[in-house]
Every structure is written in C-alpha cells, then in structure tokens.
Image (spheres, rainbow, N blue to C red):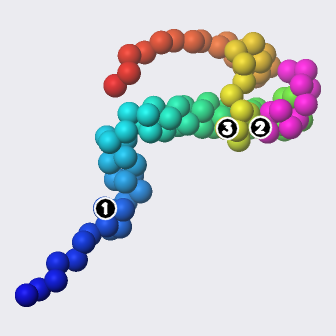
Amino acid sequence: MAIKKKTNPHVGGSLSELIERRKARSPDFARLYDEELDKLALARRLRELRESQNLSQAELAARVGTQQPAIARIESGKVVPRLDLLHKIVAALGMRLELRFAKQG
C-alpha cells in the first residue's frame, strides 16, 4: 500500500497564484491587498513625476511647504497624503489633480 503525500497549496506555485487564491478565499484580504496596491501606485507616480522634473525630495518639499521626510514617507507608500496635501504636491509639480470614481471589478 502506497503512502499518499499531502500537498502543500503554498508550494509549487508563483506568488501571484498564491495571492489570487488567497483573494478568492477572503474578501477582506482582497480589499486590503487592492488598497495597498493603490497606495503603492500613487507613491510610484508621485516619485516618477518629481524625478521627471529633476527635483530632489527636498526641493519638492520646499515648493510644497513641508519637510523632505514627509515627501519620502509619501513616496515610500507608508503614508497616504491628505487630499489637500496631495493637491499642493501636484500643483508644485505643475500639474492639476483630477479625482474620479470607477466601478470595482
């Protein structure tokens, strides 16, 4: 009689497959995961805009009226700026902030 080995669902697949399985099982996990992705996307976009203008974090902070560590925290995704601060950052980069709502899915 052969011994049947139990398979571990976390081994042998890619990280994205694991995440998709976890999201399918847990709506709370899916929501939190998507929120984190949104935060990181915002952080990455702000950094890209700043770098495209060859500005340092300190220079952008001076334009906005804040400190360099505040810009660093925002660009790291650790902090999501309040809407008024985000508006100031975008204006300091010579842009206009547009806010839109989209259906999930």
How far apart are the two marked residues, 3 and 2, measured between alpha carbons? Answer: 6 Å
Rendered location of residue 104, percent (x, y): 38, 21
Q: Which mark is residue 27?
A: none
Residue type at numbered disc 1: Pro
> To which residue does mark 2 refer?
73
Q: Under tag 3, what secondary structure?
A: loop
Residue type at numbered disc 3: Gly
Q: Residue at x 37, y 39 (%)?
A: 26
> To which residue does mark 3 refer?
77
Of labels 1 and 3, the one closer to you: 1
From which residue to which does the magenta span run?
62-72
Residue 5, relative to residue 86: is it above or below?
A: below
Q: Residue at x 86, y 37 (%)?
A: 69
> To which residue does mark 1 refer?
9
Residue type at numbered disc 2: Arg
Left or right placement of residue 103 versus residue 88 in this view: left
Q: Under tag 1, what secondary structure?
A: loop
Front one among 5 and 83: 5
**Is there any visible trace of residue 52 in the rendered image?**
no
Q: Under tag 2, what secondary structure?
A: helix
Residue 5, relative to residue 77: is it above or below?
A: below
In the rendered image, the quadrant that contains the C terminus is: top left
Callout 3: 10 Å neighbours few (<14), some, many (20+)?
A: some
